[in-house]
Structures are given as C-alpha cells and as structure tokens.
Amino acid sequence: MAASVASALTGYTSGFSSDASGRSLTILGSLSQGNVLELLCYTYRCLQLTLSLFSSKCFIRCVCTHSAQASICDTPGAVLRARAKMSLFGTTSGFGSGGTSMFGSTTTDNHNPMKDIEVTSSPDDSIGCLSFSPPTLPGNFLIAGSWANDVRCWEVQDSGQTIPKAQQMHTGPVLDVCWSDDGSKVFTASCDKTAKMWDLNSNQAIQIAQHDAPVKTIHWIKAPNYSCVMTGSWDKTLKFWDTRSSNPMMVLQLPERCYCADVIYPMAVVATAERGLIVYQLENQPSEFRRIESPLKHQHRCVAIFKDKQNKPTGFALGSIEGRVAIHYINPPNPAKDNFTFKCHRSNGTNTSAPQDIYAVNGIAFHPVHGTLATVGSDGRFSFWDKDARTKLKTSEQLDQPISACCFNHNGNIFAYASSYDWSKACCFSYVPLSLNTTWSVGQKSWNRL
Amino acid sequence: MTICQFFLQGRCRFGDRCWNEHPGARGAGGGRQQQPSGSNRRGWNTTSQRYSNVIQPSSFSKPTPWGGSRDQEKPSFAAFDSGESASRNRGFGLSQNPFASPGSDDQKDDKKLLEGIVKDMEVWESSGQWMFSVYSPVKKKPNISGFTDISPEELRLEYHNFLTSNNLQSYRNSVQQLINQWRNRVNELKSLNTSTAIALDGVNQAAPSFGFGNRQTVTFGSPGFPVNNSSSNSAQNFSFKPSSGFATASSGSTPVFGNTPAFGAVPAASSAIAAATPTFGLRKPEITSAASFSFKTPAASGFGSSGFSGFSPSMAASPVGSPVAPAFGSGSSAAGFGSPGSQPHTAFSKSSSDTFGNSSVPASLSFSLGNTTTDNALFTPKDQLTAEELEQFQSKKFTLGKIPLKPPPVELLNI
C-alpha cells in the first residue's frame, strides 16, 4: 500500500511508514503551501493519515475513508484528497471540512450545531441504539450499543453532565439495547446472533438468546403472569426467552426479516422486510393479533408505539427509508380519517416541485408525558411533531452526520440522539463520510405543548 | 356555532377538535385541494367491472387514498399532508371525479397509477434515498417485483464481514451489481406504457399477501430455465440472501424470454409487446417476480415443453392467475370473459394465499383444477380449439403471431 500511494503522489518526495496492520500510513513529504493533497476514497474504512509538512509547522491529521488494500491507489494518476476532520477518539478539534485549506482554518463546524451537551467518551463506531433507564431506577442512565461491538453505560446527571460508568463487549456489532423494568439488567442484541443480559450490579453479562442470524431487536416484556425477553432477528423469527433457560419460551415465525419492533404491554408491533407489519397482543402469552397492510411504500425502518390518554397503547408510528412516517391506530373509529402519513427529513420541505433529497427516518421516539414524537433522520436533523394536531413543532439544525438513534428519558426531560454514520450513503461510492467519529448529545428539553 | 375564521383562511390548527364551525369541511378542504373524500370513489367501484378493450383486472380494489383521507388536510400544517406527493394527488384526484363513468374511471385510475409509479421512480432516483428497498405504488398493493429489501445494517454487516476477510473489492463489486440491478429495474418501470402497466396492475392487484411469503422458499435454478445468471451472482456473494428470488428477479425476467423466444422481447422493450395484442396477457409473467417463476417451475415442470408457459404457471402463482385468464379470452369475447374471469381470480387468490407460505404449488394447482365451476372458463375443451391452436399448445414454444387467444385445454396441462 505504501508503494502505491507513493506512486500516486507524483511530484512529492515522500517517505512512508505503516503500522503493523498496514492500515495506517505516515507520509513525510515536502509540500509547498497551497498544494492540495487529495485522496480519492472508495470504501468506507476509516484511515488516519498523519502528514507532517516540512516547511510549515502545521500538521494535518487526515481522516479519510480508505481501503485497506493497495488496490485503491492503482488507478493511474489517482489523486488523493484528504479531508481533514476530527480525530477518531473523541477529541473534537476540527479543521476545515473542505479539502482545500489544510492549515487550521475553521469553516462552519456542524458537529454540534444545537449546542447540546456532548457525551464524553462516546463509542468509536456508529451508534445503533440508545436507551434510557426506566423510572424505577433513581437517576438517569443511558445505554448505547455501537458498531464497535460494545455497549456503554453513562450516568446522566441533572446538570447534563455524563459520567461513563461501564462497558460490555459482544463479538459483533450491537444492534439493540433495552432495560428490564426494574432497571437492574440491560439486554443487548448483537450481530453475533446472540443476545446478552447484563447485570449492572455485578457487571456480568451472560448470553440469554440465540438465533440463526443477527438479532435486530430486543425488548423486555413484563406481563402480570410472565416476563420475558422478546428478540427479533433476521432469521425471520421472533423468540421469547425466559432468561433462566436456554430454550425459548416461544418462537413465532415472521414473514420476513425483522427490521424493527416496539413493545408496550399488552401490544407489540414488528415491522419486517418486504413491508411487513404485524401487531401482537401479549396478554396471557404472545400471539399474533393482526397483520397490517403497510401504509408506507418503501422499506420499513423504525417503529414506535404511542399511548392514548388512558395510557394504553393504541397505535404506532412507522418510519421508512423514504422520509415518511405513518401514524396508524389499531382500532380507530374512522381509519381513513385517523390514520395518516407525513413527510419528514426531506431537503425541500413541502415544496414538492423541485427535486428534493429524501432521507431515511432512523428512529422515532414518543415523549412519555406529552405524547409528542421525535424523529431522527439520515439528513442529520431531528424533529418534534404533534400527531394529534398534526403539526411540526420544531426541527433542529442540520448536523454534519446522520442521526442514527434517539431516546427520551423516563420523564421526558432529556432527549438523547446519536450522530454517526448510518450507512445511508453506501450506494454512492463517491461519498466520503467525513469521519466515523461518533458523538452524541444530551439536550435538556423542556416541553410545552405548543 | 360561530364560524371559525381560521378555517376560512385555511389555517385552523384544531381541525376536528375546533369548537367553532367549519363550514363545508367535508369535501371542501378549505378550498385548498380539490379532492373530495374517498367515499365518492368507493361508490363507483361497486359497480360492475366493465371490460373494455383494455384488460381490466377483475377486482380492481379502490386505491385507498394514499396516506389516509384527505379530509385531514387541514391547511396550516405545512409539514403534513395526507401523505401524497403532487403526483399521487393527481393520480387519485382524477379518479375521484364523481362525473367520470365507471369504465373509463378504471382506465384512468390505471393510467394515474402508472404515472404515479413513473413519478415515484423519478423521485427515487433523484432524491438519493436508500436504493435497496421494496416499493409498492399504492398502499394495498403488494410490492412491485424486482426490488429487494436490504437494510443499511445488513449492508454494513456485509461490509464488516468482507473487511475481516480482506476482500473489500468483492464487497464493492456486489454492491455495484445490486445498484445496477436496481437502476435497471427503475428504468424499466419508468418506461412503462399503458398496456404493460395494466399488466403490472393486474399482477399487483391479485394477491395482497403476495409480498408476504413469496420469497421464502424459492427454488431457482430449475432445469427448465435457461438461466441468465450473470446478474444473479451479485447478491450471492452476500451471506444473507434476502430473497433467493431476488437474485433472480432481474434475471428471472429473461428466462421467460429465453424459453419463449416467440416473445422475442426484452423486458423493457414494450414495443414488441405492444405490437401484438394477443401476446399481451402472456407478457405478464415477465413482470411478476422470479419468485412466481420459481413457484411455477416445480408445478409446471414442463415449462419449456408445453405451451402453457403463460397459463399454467399463472395458476400456480395467483398474482398472474386472474389477469392471464381474461387475456386469453380477450380476443374471443370480452363479455364472455367478464364474469367467469372474476371467479378464477378469487378462487386463485384464495387458494394461493392459503398455500402461499408453503409454496406447495401443486396443491393450489390441483385445487383450481378441481374447481369445476371455473373449469370452463379456464380451459377450452380440446374440440373447441382449431388445429393450429392445438398445435401451438402442444409445441414447446409459442410462435409469435400464432399464440392462441383461448386458454389451453386441461388435458394438455403438464403438472
């Protein structure tokens, strides 16, 4: 790899060193000021390049996506474009986000435009899921699962300060996390086809579930006569586990891979691939209640159940990759009138004549007290909506990365969202994610109803 | 009650909950949009389906207003609409014209639906939204074939797996191939004209549950197919095969034509199809997903051999069932097929939805065969066929221009 990069940097004298994995490269070269060192990037792996310039005292730490293979540079005359951006591990010194000025100038940094509190020592890779502790636990604890195979726990104080508390590892990226109702255990679902139960008091994690494919969703069900963990997986099954036994209590077949699910006793909703949508009722034992025609035209991405005024689950919000959320009631008095969809996370707002960019809705969360909903999308924004008045309440500024997950705490005072790459641009090879750094913010949000 | 001033201006925040009166709320919509409520449309749809010279799917269900009713389009909610983009509004708005006659109404619906599909494809392409997603033009319809669902997490997991095996190039290749397939399919759909669109419609109409089980146990690669596997290799690099039918979805269309060169047409080239109306109905199998093909192949092992390439598989896979039957009869007499046409449809969709999860295609086939009431409509007795038609049915492949308009006799069916 070193050799091919060297050949690409024609005209520069350079020396190379690479670390043991062959994945990082130090180029020592003399570059006249104003020359732009450009790196064309093809794949998505983060590579950290440190360039020391002879003539100037600046050094640029370039983070770019780079293949681990030498082949990336074998295009003749390949020009390598460096995107200087923040480092990998939590410090946020940003150099210009454009490629050209490499000497410490700061262009607008949309890293945290909302000026929310940033969580310290955030995970190293994209965050897939967030979950706040239930009200039974005093204080607020936040759990995040990431693609770096870890699950981290922070205590969030009332001042907004976050204190890292503990961490557990899986052998594959963690796709979903949830708390038990008493707040003593955390359940984590991972691509290593297992789910684990993490006892926070003893800081031990044991495996409680096994699937044939990555486990995408995990939820804790607390019924009067039973309690169990529900796991949905890409192996098209929904399994219910008593944490003490290695055999599932029940296995339900899904029509397709499980993409997202939500549980508020006694209702559970599972959205699958191929626009599948199933509602389960959980009394006595989980059983399929109804299969619903999807109100959306494209792939389902996230789902969240909402409750009515009597605090009973009455419907759900379903988000798709097409920048649209459907509000669906289970037994509405007037389905045609009560169920609706709305567009969100699009670049042009309601101006439908001009071509707009459409982003996926990555997460939906309902405020536990007010019943307003928050959506986060690949466009790097989060929005709050009132589904009863059918209005948009607020949209945030655009972050520099997609927002991949969100969560309210138990009383709705805190809204956490994770800003990290969600793979939404995987189809475009020319896309260069600015970095794979993940930062996420905890914003104190106090709510008024309008 | 006092009249609500905000409503008159078109910006009442409370909508139904408003304590003031909203004059003409139902159907006026504040005067902003011109769609009356969906109930108008419903009324028209209950009238009998008239088969004009365009093939109508026998039970064209009302296109439920996308995203719920338009009554809720209370003005001030700039962020909300009833879920329709302008194109879809147009599509359904026209169909709700209470003065349209029933027959032309259906036709217009189809046309609007087609336009809606085309518009959606354009938006999909230009908007940069996630490519690997299924798509369905209207809420109640099943997914259009040729698209598969891959979530970003799955793709990313694939990337990670390839990373560990240091084989990123093949990951990139696979993704590139998937992208190409998607792009081809989108272009195909964009270039639909009316006749093929009706085919698409009919296909999509027939089985709402189509999207649900069709790809689970698909056995592609039956010997009957001269399979064009070049494009199917892409998804096979991935450890997950979301639908083994998908890998074949785009290549699945070509086997049809490989087997029946009489059609001679490439899927996207509708010109050849438009030229010969009798082939119209038979083109449908190409539009259905390969999953339905794969269902066919166990059932109609003589796919290549008998002339029932269009027909017998259609019985196996209900989506193709009903529209094909009328297609065959369209030449003979539209009216004659009008009523029986509807029966096989329901029979099929019922049978296949029962057996869909099992993909026990022969079972559904035998069910429909045993259904004596529809036998006459489904098959022509041998004596009613001319010699030439009989010969066509018996030959391995149809010859373009000589494809019989009547359904094949039951005796020649090869199950």
Image (cartoon, helix red, strand yellow):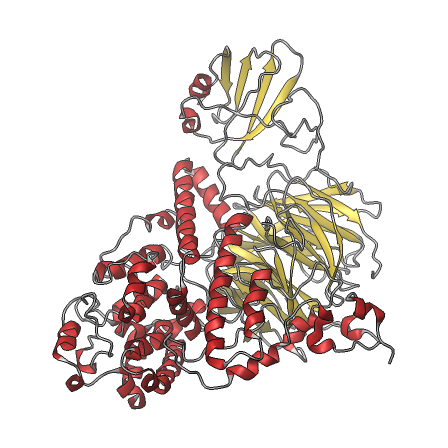
* Residue at 68 percent of width and 80 percent of height: A333
Of B132 and B345, the residue lying toward us: B345
Q: Position of residue B387 (x, y in %)?
A: 12, 78
Q: Furthest-right residue in view?
A: B2
Q: Position of residue A74 (x, y in %)?
A: 40, 25
Q: Position of residue B264 (x, y in %)?
A: 24, 59
Of B307 and B388, the residue lying toward us: B388
Q: Is residue A245 visible?
A: no
| Left or right side of A160 for B135 | left
Q: Furthest-bottom residue in view?
A: B373
Q: Is residue B62 above or below residue A445?
A: below
* Residue at 65 percent of width and 68 percent of height: A340
Q: Is residue A66 visible?
A: yes
| Left or right side of A432 for B52 | left
**Picture quarter containing residue B402?**
bottom left
* Residue at 47 percent of width and 31 percent of height: A67
Q: Is residue B20 above or below residue A194?
A: below
Of A394 and B277, the residue lying toward us: B277
Quadrant containing the N terminus of chain A in the rendered view? top left
Quadrant containing the C terminus of chain A in the rendered view? bottom right
| Left or right side of A385 for B184 | left
Q: Position of residue A279 (x, y in %)?
A: 58, 71
